[in-house]
Image (cartoon, grey):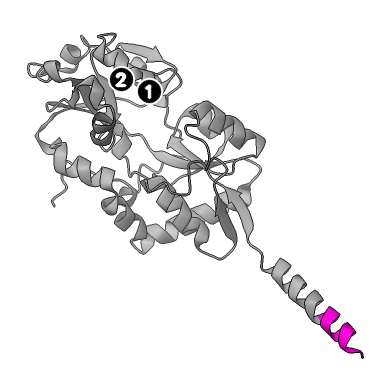
């Protein structure tokens, strides 16, 4: 056998082995530099098992609307997104039924104008609270939750418009998950906003990963790895290490607030309500 043939065979073997061990690309929402909890959870879950490689097709884009993410997931241009679950999302996409934020997104505190910081100081009942109007995204699942519970909502399609609308008095408050408002009021400092210190509106609201219905392989992998991350403590560690979660626990004083529990009609029967290890209760949490 000539040297040329030997070299050709060796190169062919190398190419074959390389193809055999090439990782399949999974396209994920957001940017490769994102450090928020769901992004870190997805990266950790997908790197396990040495099967998938994470790619971020939106890396060069400034802001991508949720509507586009949903369209890209439906078309297969994206493989993984995340968000608060709803009947519509679970019907359209395959949910991975592990709540990433452990239910913290359903613990809502209000952004208000600084001059209205004491607006809720005399609110003692849910009926009292219903005298005030909330600002929400038109298509957000929590908009339907608030409306179903008789809470007045002013809707706006674009998230970033809600901050000047609040300052302009179009509505009274902007309810956010307990981990969300602290960074937002810093980013939107030009609008002179603050976080209400008095109330907590609470409902069960899981944040799930979603994949296309025809990519059950990715859904199975994520489910298996997230279950392992629950068992080995990784998910809990990532949760408590998240800066936004830390801000909520340090700044929100959730245990000192009046709590209004409301219903979430958007929950499906697949919600893991009976698995206490998947949920977090900040009202009993001790640092």
Look at mark 1 in the image and give the residue it sits on.
160
Q: Total label count?
A: 2
Residue appearing at x 24%, y 32% in the figure:
186
Answer left or right for 215 relative to 34.
Answer: right
Q: Is residue 256 visible?
A: yes
Answer left or right for 223 relative to 212.
Answer: left
Q: Quadrant of residue 202?
A: top left
Using the image, tell me which numbered label, if any, was put on residue 210. none
Residue appearing at x 44%, y 34% in the figure:
85
Answer left or right for 137 relative to 104.
Answer: right
Q: Secondary structure at mark 1?
A: helix
Extent of the magenta region: 1-9
Q: Nearer the viewer, residue 37 or 59?
A: 59
Q: CA distance from mark 2 to mark 1?
A: 6 Å
Q: Is-magenta flag for residue 48?
A: no
Name of the residue lying farthest toward the right: 1
């Amino acid at each position: 056998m000539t040297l040329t043939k030997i070299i050709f065979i060796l190169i062919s073997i190398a190419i074959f082995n390389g193809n055999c061990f090439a990782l399949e690309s999974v396209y994920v929402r957001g940017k490769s530099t994102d450090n928020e909890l769901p992004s870190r959870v997805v990266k950790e879950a997908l790197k396990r098992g040495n099967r998938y490689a994470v790619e971020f097709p939106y890396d060069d884009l400034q802001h991508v609307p949720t509507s586009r993410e949903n369209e890209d997931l439906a078309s297969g241009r994206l493989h993984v997104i995340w968000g608060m679950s709803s009947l519509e999302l679970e019907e359209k996409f395959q949910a991975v039924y592990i709540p990433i934020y452990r239910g913290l997104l359903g613990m809502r505190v209000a952004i208000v104008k600084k001059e209205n910081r004491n607006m809720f100081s005399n609110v003692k009942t849910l009926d009292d609270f219903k005298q005030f109007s909330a600002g929400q995204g038109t298509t957000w699942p929590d908009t339907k939750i608030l409306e179903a519970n008789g809470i007045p909502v002013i809707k706006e399609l674009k998230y970033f418009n809600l901050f000047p609308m609040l300052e302009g008095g179009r509505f009274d408050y902007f309810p956010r998950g307990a981990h969300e408002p602290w960074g937002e009021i810093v980013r939107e400092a030009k609008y002179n906003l603050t976080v209400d210190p008095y109330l907590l509106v609470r409902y069960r609201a899981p944040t799930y990963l979603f994949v296309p219905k025809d990519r059950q392989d990715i859904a199975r992998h994520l489910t298996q790895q997230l279950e392992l991350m629950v068992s080995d403590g990784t998910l809990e560690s990532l949760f408590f290490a998240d800066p936004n979660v830390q801000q909520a626990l340090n700044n929100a004083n959730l245990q000192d607030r009046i709590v209004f529990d409301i219903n979430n009609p958007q929950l499906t029967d697949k919600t893991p309500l009976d698995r206490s290890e998947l949920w977090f209760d900040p009202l009993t949490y001790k640092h």
